[in-house]
Amino acid sequence: MAATTWLIGAWLVAVAPVPAYDVPDFDTQVLPILTRAGCNTGACHGAAAGQQGFHLSLWGSDPAADLLAIRHEARGRRVNLARPELSLLWRKATGELDHDGGGPLTADSPAGLLVLDWIGQGAPRGAERRLVTFEVNAGPPLCAVGESRPLAASAHFNDGTMQDVSQTVVWTARDPALLDLTPEGVARPLRPGRHVVLARFLQEVRAIVLVAPHAAQPLDLAAEPRTNLVDDEILDSLAELAVRPAPPAADGAWLRRVTLDLTGRLPEAADLARFEQDHSSTRREQILDRLLAGPEFVDHWTLFWGRLLRLDSRTMTPGGAAAFQARIRAFVASGQGAGAWIRELLTAHGDYREHAEVNFLRGSGNARELAEQVGRTFLGARLECANCHNHPLDRWTQDDYHGLAAIFATLERGETVRYSGRGEVTHPRTRQAALPRLPGVSTLAAGHDARPELAAWLTEGEEPPAARALVNRLWREVFGQGLVEPVDDLRATNPPTHPELLTELAAKLVAEDWDWRLTLRRLVLSQAYGRAAAPERALAEATHYAAAAWRPLSPESYLDAVTQVTGLPQNLLQPTPEVPNLPEASQAANLVDPALPSAALDALGRCALPKCTSQSGGGRTRWLHLMNAQLLNARLDAPGSRLERALAAGASDAEIITEFYVAALSRSPTPAELAGWQAHVTAAFAKVAQGERQTANQRRECLADFVWSLLVSREFSTNH
């Protein structure tokens, strides 16, 4: 038979046809048809309990078990070897009998005829035939909006054959609202941007990226300023997408952004004045060096690492959480590299009070939970999907999941953490003790503490996986979104927006002895980071880093910013019957433990659930709280507040308005804004009954309304 030739863009791709066969092979020919038809998905018979008594392995991960279910279960009713057309499998799949999954096969299709032929020849397993490589061809990545692009796939097997499997691949668009994709694998972008298509064949999944530019011709951005490798990659991408970057942010906007991102606090008016008066070429580097060396940086990034490592007194005990927070703070303040810190956390042992880093290992209920936490934190991977079955979208297997858990099963994790040599994890498929394993790499010898080998694999070598995971998280902290989102779901089928950039940044991190501060410095010095925030630009453009994104402040940063602007701290901890004795805490960044009771933080969206690693944002509850509760109202004109001090000093309305604009937004009001607020105060006075004398209290109330408006504005509550 002649090879099939595909014309894909400017490429001619020749793929060998399916070779002639005597008996169809179940593993590599029949099973892909059932997968393409959706029979073994989680919504159908691939669910954990199956459907209607018929259970198949998810996505055909266990062919032997699937053949057993089809041929021998239900008293062999699913296949009729004498009359294949009367087989229950055939009649339901073709819709001849009622079937909740519809009739995904047709009697006259090549796929349907192959299944029927397979049943007629005895429904055998077939000769041993294994997939060696799976390749997907999409042609050039650029694809105009509305252009139809056929996708082709080929499979290579261990018997030396290669075949076109395009019609048995499961094609899936990651965002169907942005990309139209037919079951036959013809893609058509509906909007500009980067579009990801997943192609599944047997247990292999490939990701294809199609780029639909915003204009017919790419832009020439060679003249755009570049600071480092971040700009090289981002500008090349914007040129390909035909998206012009926004101009640089104003000095005040940049200083406010970088101060919030690195310290969780607002810049002081004196800092802003010095920065705007400094015209040296190194003024931004000087600001960064000062911020990175300050105590506020330590406070802010202790909170980051505490949340990443799931510091929580409900799982670690209050004493353990307090000791762990102090140890994290010491790590941030010391300048220790992240690689050595990760190794220390994973291999820690000793009493939790004397060796506080062991509390990371104490914070999970059992070995499986600890394995999942290690996967999310240091691998950036959701291993829990491989607990019951091989991961449907990643390379992780059940052996990987339970093998990683087996590394931690031999630990005693009470007040003292130590390797005991006892304990095991039962593999649910084999019903035997799982062997210790580095996920996706190799099985380890049993009978010893394998944690050093795990720590070395995560942090050493040319491309240690923990480096990519950490860089991606640091990128999200300063850009608002990871190069891979979600940040704990790094996998081949969830490709980065800028793959080369992620690889280069991870390599830099390792080469610089895991000094994650240098990574932060590199990111915030880039032109991409310093661009103006342009809310009127399309959201899609912000995702390509053509402009800075408007990001809500975290509850902790928002509360500390309110304290700075109003000049009036308050105790953020409220004792409860369960926790009666609490120290005073006026700085939200220091409340690393999410179990500490703080009504203000909870109302603003702090995630107080155990093992929380993200912020919920607060939503409607947050804004109702800001509008009606005493969090702001009690601070606006209270004795000792910034407003009271300004009034006592005899400041004019214009001076007070300008002072608060600088304190809250790191800029002066525009002439229109200043005139508008002055008119507001004047208009409020005019409402006083005729003949009634205007009082200082009425002026205070009007100005307090102005301050409240600033503190609930989008410009204040976002890191724009």
Image (tube, helix red, strand yellow):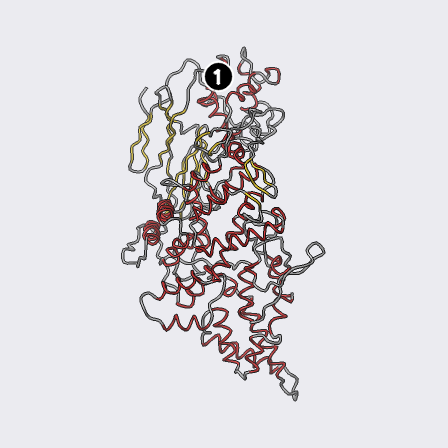
Side of 620 where 257 appears, left or right: left
**In the depicted view, which residue is nearer to us: 513 or 508?**
513
**In the depicted view, which residue is nearer to us: 243 or 449?**
449
Instruction: Using the image, determine if residue 197 lies above or below residue 561.
Output: above
Instruction: Using the image, determine if residue 363 lies above or below residue 545.
Output: above
Regarding residue 409, the answer to whether it shows in the image is no
The location of residue 215, given as percent across then percent down, is: 34, 51
Q: Which residue is mark 1?
A: 125
**Residue at disc 1, secondary structure:** loop
**In the depicted view, which residue is nearer to us: 396 or 465?**
465
Q: Amino acid at mark 1?
A: Arg
The location of residue 670, given as percent across then percent down, is: 45, 74
Q: Residue at x 46, y 35 (%)?
A: 394
The location of residue 151, given as percent across then percent down, is: 38, 34
Q: Residue at x 37, y 51 (%)?
A: 214
> Going by the picture, which residue comes out furthest to the right?
577
The location of residue 7, given as percent across then percent down, is: 31, 33
